[in-house]
Image (tube, helix red, strand yellow):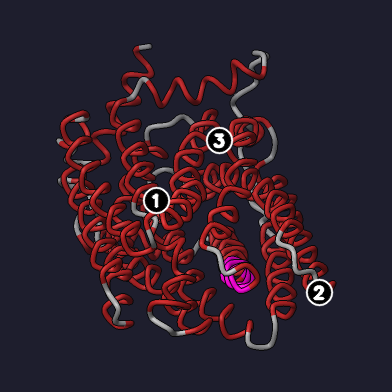
Amino acid sequence: MSPAHAAVETESVLKDTDFRKLLASRLFAATAIQIQSVVVGWQLYDMTHSALTLGWVGLAQFLPMAALVLPAGDAADRLPRRHLLITSSTAMMIAALLFLGLTLSGTESPVGFYGVLVLFGIARTFSGPSLTALLPQIVGERRLPKAIALNSSVFQIAIIGGPALGGAVYLAGPAAAYLLSAVLFGLAATAILAIRKVLPPRADTTRLPALERFAAGIRYVRTRPIILGAISMDLFAVLLGGATALLPVYAHSILHVGPLGLGALRSAVAVGAFAMGLYLARVSLNRRAGPTMFVAVAIFGLGTIVFGLSTNFVLSFAALAIMGAADMISMYVRSSLIQLATPDAMRGRVNAVNMLFVGASNELGEFESGVTAALLGTVPAVIVGGLGTLAVVGLWAAMFPALRRIDRLDDVARQHREADQAA
């Protein structure tokens, strides 16, 4: 696709009113999540002065996701995805208000915060597959890659502004930040409620037992090596290279930049990802997609090592920005493969499997980073994680040659559809 044609498709999808409402909801919710993440991390670390506490924050959100993500994906294939998004956004608003209540109570124990994080993790679990599966229904498959890039760019805007905003609002106290998060979650639910487009009915009307329906998504991914290779590489690479989980430690004890600096560091990853997302929205990445993905993950690992060794704020910021840009490329290829190669009737469940992998790499990665830092020290833990990411790239290149040889994304999508029809 030529750059001029790509720009026309970008302009076309942005003219879609309901797509803009979906983007607004994504922006509000993601900003609230980032504000809340900065505040919870700083508040609990300040309360306990333990890196392991940050690991428990990640685990409290991962466990409910691991338990419920497959039912959440099934729900997204059998219930109105729009209604599920409204409900989950409302539940996240309630969680923010509970954080506010705990803060105002003056508690010095993190236990109550962990309990609310579990509730918050449940709400995010049901939001993820519904949001991802709803996107193709609104924009259609032809405009989907551009919509994915724009949706990701909006998410990165939230990651850029949210942590910085969270760090600034934290100066007025954590209660103010939690209240702002609750308002933003409410706006996210309202934006989804305003979507008026008549969506096509769900094609999955099977009467299979629940466990068989859940297993269908896993089976679909397992029998397609390209999709399995893409999401599993992301799992292990980010799981090992989860330096961002230890940002409160770097901001507090290594770089000495305080909560405002922590917000800036958390935004750095998104700065790189946002710039790359805008580029991908204008110029299609539709040649040598597989090799590009492997190179991007390797750059992510190298950036992790540089960040781990750095004691300079500017260098640390730059390393995180490069990691964000590399991760955006990997995410774009992976998301495009999954969406274009999956029938609509299964998108909820297949995206739930992807969300399980991504969640394991993020939330479980936070736990892994916290434990490793407690055992080895913060800097050695980050360096070892970066080296592990590079090892994963080499191993996956050998294990999944079909993924390494991918050229055009649309060719892969067509091949998967032909395989489905033949089956």
Residue 215 position, x and y percent, is: 54, 20
Kindly indicate whether the residue at mark 1 contacts the one at mark 3 (C-beta within 8 angstroms): no
Occupied quadrant, residue 23: bottom right
Identify residue type, mark 3: Gly
Cα separation between marks 3 and 1: 19 Å
**For the magenta stretch, what is the residue range?**
36-46
Q: Of the numbered discs in the image, which one, if any, rests on residue 143?
A: 1
Q: Quick check: 77 left or right of 411?
A: right
* Residues packed near mark 1 inside 10 Å, few (<14), some (14 to 19) or many (20 plus): some
* Pointer 3 residue: 348
Compared to residue 369, the image places residue 399 above or below, namely above
Residue in the picture at 38% in, 61% down: 377
- Which sits earlier in the primary sequence, circle 3 or circle 1? 1
Quadrant where the C terminus is found in the figure: top left
- Which sits earlier in the primary sequence, circle 2 or circle 3? 2
Mark 3 element type: helix
Q: Of the numbered discs in the image, which one, if any, rests on residue 106?
A: 2
Identify residue type, mark 2: Gly
Q: Nearer the viewer, mark 2 or mark 3?
A: 2
